[in-house]
Amino acid sequence: MDVLAQVSGNITAIGYGLAAIGPGIGVGIIFGQGVQAIARQPEAYGLIRQNMLLGFVLTEALALLGLVAPFIFRLIK
């Protein structure tokens, strides 16, 4: 019995879902290491928090680019 799997809908949704794994892991690492750094050196809270938020923004920017890219490439074709 041969069963063929068909994907209905837009395949870019599946691609973005897989691509969102990377930024999700990155954000987890950023905040996990940031909390550890603040626990080790509470006096450097301001600098650590600033760098942590900057890393978060850059990581999320990559995720948003991955979300927008399929729409841009669909318009070009």
Image: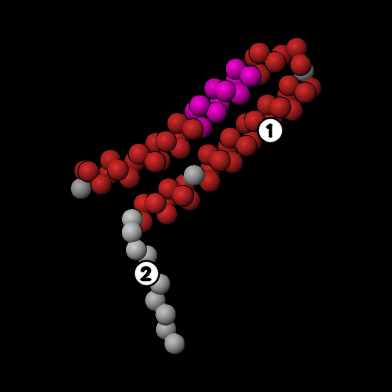
Q: Residue furthest left?
A: 77
The three-letter code of the residue at mark 1 reads: Gly
Query: What residue is at 47 percent from the left and 46 percent from the top?
Result: 19
Q: Is residue 63 above or below residue 50?
A: below
Q: Which residues are magenta?
A: 49-59
Residue shown at 34% from the left, 63% from the top: 8
Name above or below for residue 51 compared with residue 65: above
Query: Badge 1 local density, few (<14 within 10 Å), some, or many (20+)?
Result: few
In percent of the image, x 49 and y 32: which residue is there? Answer: 60
User: Would you say 59 lies left or right of 16 here?
Assistant: right
Disc with the residue nearer the chain's start (1 vs 2): 2
Would you say residue 55 sits in the magenta stretch? Answer: yes
Secondary structure beneath label 2: loop
Residue 72 is situated, as x and y percent measured from the top left of the image, at 28, 40
| Alpha carbon separation for disc pair 1 and 2 | 40 Å
Residue topped by disc 1: 32
Which residue is labeled 2 in the image?
6
Amino acid tagged 2? Gln
- Classify residue 41 by image quadrant: top right
Q: Is residue 18 above or below residue 50?
A: below
Residue 29: % across, % down: 64, 35
Q: The N terminus is located in which quarter? A: bottom left
> Residue 31, located in which quarter of the rendered image?
top right
Q: Residue furthest right?
A: 40
Element type where label 1 sits in the image: helix
